[in-house]
Amino acid sequence: MSKAIVTGGAGFIGSNLVDKLVELYDRVIVIDNETADSNEQFYYNDKAEQHLLNVGDYKNTRPLYDGVDCVFHLAAESRIQPTLDNPVLAALSNVVGTCTVLQCAKEAGVKRVIYSSTSSGYGLKNKIPLIETMPDDCLNPYSVTKVSGEKLCKMYTDLFGLETVVFRYFNVYGERHPIKGPYAPVIGIFIRQKQNGEELTIIGDGRQTRDFTHVSDVVSANILASNTDNKKPVGELINLGTGTNNSILEIAQMVGNKYTFLPARDGEAQDTLANITKAKELLGWSPTVDVEDWIRDNS
């Protein structure tokens, strides 16, 4: 019987992934503690098994890993600004939680762990396009703790032989993206504001650019990475983006509404743009969804 675990499987990216995995695995286990502030709701697939637990809870989660083929680790404190308010919580979730997942997987003989990380690890010093060999430039508790998780994955591969694959996501959007609160992804915020008849609020001057990646493309990369017959991505850090970017002002114009400007926030990169050569070469993966087309159809 094939078996997978998805941590954070009730959230935005995780639930989209679960919807595909239930078609591929005999048993899919979701571990989620439902604490993501930006989610207006959590999403559960009736074909998956649900466990309301913290990933750092070794005692109660450890038995779930027995017989598991692949772990998709998405659970995290996953926004920059909230981690500035509570760095300790970020470390507990993103570092201790990740180490617990890896240790459980190691002890249970899991074949592979796929870890979801962030392009925030590139920071401000690196110039676009961003490539995996660039040095880390962590500017906030979010990026520090997520990159620490990357290092833990590499250590568990090198020291213990646990197969891991690490993805750095670039500005994921799409179905079920968070739309609540000031720190939800910008596309979600803009669509919510338009639907509510409000002006769109642009942080800074709007000229900052982002590589916007659709959630379905992230899901397909995770599924490709779970093929344990392919050893090429094991122990690797891999960008997931589109290789193109748009300014926040361009996104506002695509959504199509009046907009206003708010003060810029510290500690956020001016531009992001992924070099995705590695994903293409190691996984045979390419993005398929264009952000302008998606916004036109969904805003």
Image (cartoon, helix red, strand yellow):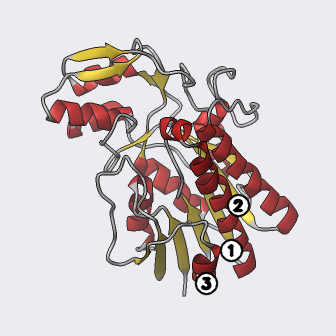
- Identify the amino acid type marked 3: Pro
Residue drawn at point x = 73 percent, y = 65 percent: 163
Question: 59 or 289: which is nearer to us?
Answer: 59
Residue drawn at point x = 53 percent, y = 61 percent: 223
- Are the residues at dot 3 and dot 1 in contact (C-beta closer than 8 Å)? no
According to the picture, the residue beneath numbered tag 3 turns out to be 63
In the rendered image of this protein, does residue 223 appear above or below residue 239? below
Q: Is residue 235 visible?
A: no
Residue at the far left: name it.
197
Question: 215 or 66: which is nearer to us?
Answer: 66
Tell me where residue 260 appears, x and y as whole percent: 27, 15
Give the position of the C terminus as an image quadrant.
Answer: top left
Residue at the far right: name it.
159
| Distance between mark 1 and mark 2 Cα atoms | 13 Å
Check residue 104 in the rendering and tell me which mark sits there, or answer none. 1
- Identify the amino acid type marked 1: Cys
Quadrant location of residue 254? top left
- Helix, strand or loop for disc 2: strand
Q: How crowded is mark 3: few (under 14 residues within 10 Å), some or many (20 or more)?
A: few
- Are the residues at dot 1 and dot 2 in contact (C-beta closer than 8 Å)? no
- Helix, strand or loop for disc 1: helix
Quadrant location of residue 226? bottom right
- The first of marks 1 and 2 along the sequence is 1
In the rendered image of this protein, does residue 155 appear above or below residue 118? below
According to the picture, the residue beneath numbered tag 2 turns out to be 164
Residue drawn at point x = 45 percent, y = 65 percent: 33
